[in-house]
Amino acid sequence: QVQLVESGGGLVQPGGSLRLSCAASGFILDYYAIGWFRQAPGKEREGVSCISNHDGSTYYGDSVKGRFTISRDNAKNTVYLQMNSVTPEDTAVYYCAKAPWVLTPLLPNGYEDWGQGAQVPVYS
């Protein structure tokens, strides 16, 4: 059974850091690209980051570039999203999803098997 489970969410203060994990099961992680997306209340789902399966290329949305880092540990079947210098604008539910290949890494189309999401509220 294919499953993606996000963890590590929780309240964080502005300027703080948080690391989200996306634990994969039921498939071979290194065969897939993994994307992180987020959705804030009343807003559309936004592409945050992606790490490819072929050469480990990484992609970031403009709003998180330089602050967030995506990485993968295929041995642990886990992808991480390190979030630094967070702001209230980062408040959202964060989702991970897999794709066999990605032509548009930061768009949700093409991704399959989404996780249920991890809430990240950022406020003092």
Image (cartoon, helix red, strand yellow):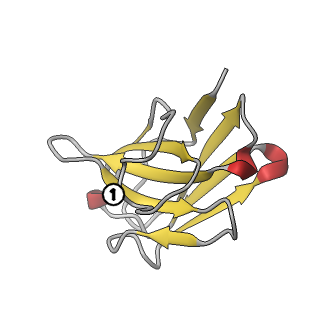
Q: Position of residue 9 (x, y in %)?
A: 50, 42
- Taking depth in this image into account, of 120 and 5 the one nearest to the observer is 5
* Label 1 neighbour load within 10 Å: few <14, some 14-19, many 20+: many
| Up-down relation of residue 25 to residue 79 (above or below) | above
| Up-down relation of residue 123 to residue 22 (above or below) | below
Residue that badge 1 annotates: 90
Residue 82 location, quadrant: bottom right
Q: Residue at x 46, y 29 (%)?
A: 116
Q: Position of residue 70 (x, y in %)?
A: 59, 63
| Up-down relation of residue 59 to residue 117 (above or below) | below
Left or right of 24 on screen, residue 106: left
Which residue, as the protein is rendered here, is positioned at the far bottom? Answer: 66
- Does any portion of residue 124 appear in the rendered image? no
Q: Position of residue 11 (x, y in %)?
A: 42, 44
Give the residue type that dot 1 points to: Asp
- Taking depth in this image into account, of 100 and 64 the one nearest to the observer is 100
For the N terminus, which image quadrant? top right
